Amino acid sequence: MQHQPAAIGFLRHDVSGTHQRWDQAQMRQLARRLGYDLCRTLVYGPETSEILEEVRDAISQNEADAVITPSLEHFDGEIPDPLVQVADVITVTPENTYARWRTRPS
């Protein structure tokens, strides 16, 4: 049996609003289609401080290769550089992969 790479789901409940369950289902479906084991989903809101550090800790703890999020809006419109340094970030809508940097771009 081949080992599936792990992924972390990430969303902000204030961005998803009433669509939170739908967003979570879409992340699970995309993870499955891309061959990831969605081992954990992190749900935060605007009241949470240090979100980036918590996401990075979850990546480390779960040895995750990717973070799947419903859209860039959940990261305030752009993928944080410190995050893409440690994991691929995949958005559901539009479906896009922001590949981690194996070596720093010149």
Image (spheres, rainbow, N blue to C red):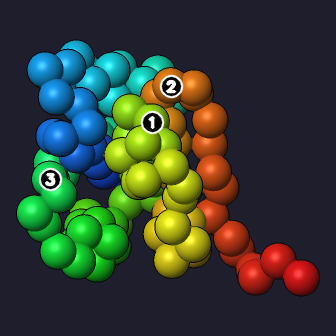
Please report the residue visible at 41 percent of the width from the left and 54 percent of the height from the top. Answer: 75
- Looking at the image, how many numbered discs can be counted on the residues? 3
Residue at 23 percent across and 77 percent down: it is: 50
Task: State the SS at label 3.
Answer: loop
Pointer 2 residue: 93
Q: Mark 3: which amino acid?
A: Gly
Q: Which residue is mark 1?
A: 71
Label pair 2/1, CB-CB below 8 angstroms: yes
Q: CA distance from mark 3 to mark 2?
A: 20 Å
Nearer the observer, 57 or 1: 57
x%, y% of residue 70?
38, 33
Check disc 1 and give the amino acid type: Ser
Q: Earlier in the sequence, mark 2 or mark 1?
A: 1
Decide: few, some or many residues near mark 3? Use Cα within 10 Å; few <14, some 14-19, many ≥20.
Answer: some
Q: Residue furthest right?
A: 106
- On the image, the x and y values in percent for residue 43 come to 15, 48
Q: Position of residue 67 (x, y in %)?
A: 41, 51
Q: Quadrant of the C terminus?
A: bottom right
- Whichever of callouts 3 and 2 sits on the residue coming sooner in the sequence is 3
Q: Is residue 92 above or below residue 7?
A: above
Report the mark closest to the observer, 3 or 2.
Answer: 3
Distance (Cα) linking label 2 and label 1: 5 Å
- Tell whether 94 sits left or right of 12: right
Distance between mark 1 and mark 3 Cα atoms = 15 Å
Q: Which residue is mark 3?
A: 45
Disc 1 secondary structure class: loop
